């Protein structure tokens, strides 16, 4: 008879290694009754489905399943009974190797190696390199220790970029590592927002984040110093030819006509976070360019690439960073409880928070209202039975990814909170559908990058220099203050007339009530204004006019998003044909 812990480990293994569609197919093939009630893989609960299979099969059957069904090529599993690595399943566990790895680390690095391991365990097994350095108070350089632990298979890398590194302990190994280090195990409880043990711990947490903002400020300052000394004239020259069309052409040449627009949105948002004032010929509008951004849809459609890799960079993947240096706060592994606390370190500051798995934040109760306020850049106050956080005003923006069930018409969010549409309503959103055409374009793009057929080095540096300089000018950074004028973006009646024509064409095709609010229109206007910031050096004016090209792209975004939010009650192409011929 199979032991309970082996069944639990099988469940974790199956959920980790197989995509939802494969789990659903396996359950159906095995004739497990649990799966009979569902039409789609998205209808079944991933935990329950994996457990049903884990209970139903023997080790021999498990091996056959792994030979027959497609596994995730990135997945790693190192348990007591099973190991999955290099796309191969072994019925031998990994704990002896992990035990030997811990011993070798202690032998090589002494108490420093154990100190790093304990710090990771106390952070629930996941830590970014910068965060770990801060937690260790700079007494130890954790990088060589973490590289050794990775080599010895004690930890795995969860993200490696130019400016951010993160490692994690696998869920199945964490209890064993706790035991090896003599750290008492903790009883599992459902995820809730819990206060820190005491006020001193809370203040340390906040102070750590303030130190992080200082590091990011230093990163921006260093980059701007280098740009001004070595590449200022080239950047201005480049800026005189740069535009939204230039950026679109650059991205299409790299990633193709289907994939490019997500990266286009991400880079335009980098200009938007300067939060430039929007005016009309009569005066102020009360609007600014900043907006939050979401890519949602099926897994594996390139969402993380566009919001994270293209902005922060992945040198090993031949992708250089395109975002504003020192102004993108990567939030991998951060809980919403931590976000609410560290948000206080950003009062009066404008950063972009990159959240790779937005779904996870909604496993915690009470998050919709707080995040809705954060999206509105309002005053956050969160009360717990032992602690009150805030009030403080959050002035930053988000770029996030989250998974959805994509259906024949429209989509269904995988976030259970019925009020989640209030969050979506406050962002510019874009749906990802894994069509055959998109799949082929992703595969071809990866192949061309791997073969060196395209290079993003020079183009990425030019764009990053330009966006960094525009950000510095429009936020009046001390290094450029007085050298260049701060310019508002001017919107005219013609822009609103173009948006109005799009509105009329959309509304006449929707027979019932609307599933989106006027915020959608406001956000696409902000998008058009942000896209016009690319023209800062093009005209000798004391303002930046909204370009016709930016307005046309904003209208296309407006029509597409209105269609998706309306469960595709109309086809975007029909509206665009009416508007543009």
Image (spheres, grey):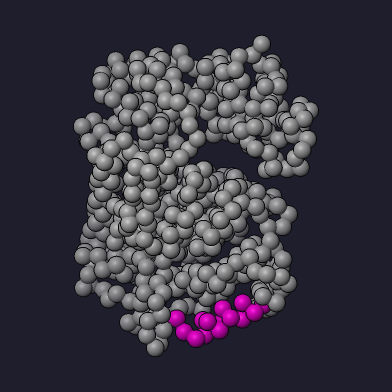
Viewer-proximal residue among 318 and 26: 26
Q: Quadrant of the C terminus?
A: bottom right
Q: Position of residue 87 (x, y in %)?
A: 59, 27
Above-or-below relation of 248 to 62: below
Region of the chain picked out in magenta, as a range: 490-505
Picture mark count = 0
Q: Residue furthest bottom?
A: 282
Q: Quadrant of the N terminus?
A: top right
Q: Residue at x 53, y 60 (%)?
A: 422
* x, y percent for residue 297: 60, 51
Q: Position of residue 363 (x, y in %)?
A: 51, 43
Q: 418 or 169, which lies in front? A: 418
Q: Is residue 498 magenta?
A: yes
- Taking depth in this image into account, of 5 and 417 the one nearest to the observer is 417
Taking the view exactly as shown, the residue that stands out farthest to the front is: 385
The question of residue 430 being in magenta is answered with no
Q: Is any part of residue 574 visible from this angle?
A: no
Q: Main secondary structure of the magenta part?
A: helix
Q: Is residue 136 left or right of residue 247?
A: left
The residue at 36%/61% (across/down) is 379
Tell me which residue sits at (70%, 52%) in the image.
407
Choose between 253 and 271: the one closer to the eye.
271
Above or below, 456 relative to 510: above
Q: Position of residue 555 (x, y in %)?
A: 57, 73
- Residue 576 appears in the rendering: yes
Location of residue 243 by image quarter: bottom left
Examine the image and state in which quarter residue 109 appears: top left
Extreme residue toward the top, this view: 1
Q: Say left or right for 102 vs 574.
A: left
Q: Is 89 situated above or below 220?
A: above
Instruction: Tell me the residue at 37%/81% (across/down).
Output: 284
């Amino acid at each position: 008879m199979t032991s309970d812990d082996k069944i639990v480990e099988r469940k974790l293994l199956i959920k980790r290694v197989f995509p939802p569609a494969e789990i659903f197919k396996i359950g159906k093939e095995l004739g497990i009754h649990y799966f009979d009630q569902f039409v789609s893989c998205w209808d079944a609960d991933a935990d329950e489905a994996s457990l049903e299979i884990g209970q139903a099969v023997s080790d021999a059957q498990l091996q056959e399943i792994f030979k027959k069904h497609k596994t995730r090529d990135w997945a790693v599993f190192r348990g007591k009974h099973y190991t999955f690595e290099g796309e191969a399943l072994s019925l031998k566990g990994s704990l002896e190797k992990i035990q030997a790895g811990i011993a070798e680390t202690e032998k090589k690095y002494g108490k420093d190696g154990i100190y790093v391991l304990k710090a990771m365990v106390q952070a629930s097994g996941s830590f970014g390199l910068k965060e770990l350095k801060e937690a260790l108070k700079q007494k130890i350089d954790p990088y060589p220790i973490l590289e050794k632990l990775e080599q010895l298979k004690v930890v795995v890398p969860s993200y490696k970029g130019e400016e951010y590194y993160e490692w994690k302990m696998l869920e199945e190994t964490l209890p064993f590592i706790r035991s090896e280090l003599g750290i008492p195990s903790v009883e599992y409880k459902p995820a809730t927002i819990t206060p820190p043990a005491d006020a001193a711990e809370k203040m340390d947490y906040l102070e750590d984040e303030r130190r992080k903002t200082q590091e990011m400020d230093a990163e921006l300052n260093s980059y701007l110093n280098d740009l001004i000394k070595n590449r200022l004239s080239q950047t201005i020259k480049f800026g005189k030819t740069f535009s939204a069309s230039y950026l679109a052409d650059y991205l299409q040449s790299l990633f193709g006509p289907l994939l490019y627009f997500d990266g286009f949105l991400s880079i335009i948002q980098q200009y938007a976070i300067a939060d430039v004032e929007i005016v009309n010929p009569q005066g102020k509008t009360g609007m600014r360019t900043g907006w939050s951004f979401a890519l949602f849809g099926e897994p594996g459609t390139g969402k993380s690439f566009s919001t994270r890799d293209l902005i922060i960079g992945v040198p090993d993947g031949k992708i250089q960073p395109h975002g504003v240096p020192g102004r993108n706060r990567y939030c991998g592994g951060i809980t919403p409880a931590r976000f609410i606390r560290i948000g206080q370190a950003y009062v009066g500051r404008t950063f972009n928070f990159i959240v790779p798995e937005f779904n996870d934040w909604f496993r915690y109760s009470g998050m919709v209202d707080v995040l809705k306020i954060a999206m509105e850049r309002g005053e956050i106050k969160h009360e717990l039975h032992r602690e009150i956080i805030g009030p403080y005003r959050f002035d930053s923006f988000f770029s996030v990814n989250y998974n959805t069930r994509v259906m024949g018409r429209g989509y269904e969010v995988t976030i259970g909170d019925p009020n989640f549409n209030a969050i979506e309503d406050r962002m510019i959103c874009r749906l990802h559908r894994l069509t055959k055409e998109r799949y082929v374009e992703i595969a071809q793009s990866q192949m061309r990058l791997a073969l060196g057929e395209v290079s993003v080095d020079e183009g990425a540096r030019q764009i990053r220099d330009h966006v960094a300089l525009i950000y510095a000018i429009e936020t009046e950074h001390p290094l450029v203050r007085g050298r260049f004028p701060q310019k508002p973006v001017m919107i005219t009646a013609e822009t609103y007339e173009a948006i109005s024509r799009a509105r009329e064409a959309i509304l006449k095709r929707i027979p019932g009530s609307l599933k989106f609010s006027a915020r959608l229109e406001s956000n696409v206007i902000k998008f058009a204004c942000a896209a016009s910031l690319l023209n800062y050096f093009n005209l000798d004016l004391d303002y930046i006019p909204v370009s016709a090209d930016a307005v046309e792209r904003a209208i296309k975004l407006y029509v597409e998003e209105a269609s998706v939010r309306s469960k595709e009650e109309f086809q975007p192409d029909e509206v665009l044909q009416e508007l543009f011929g």
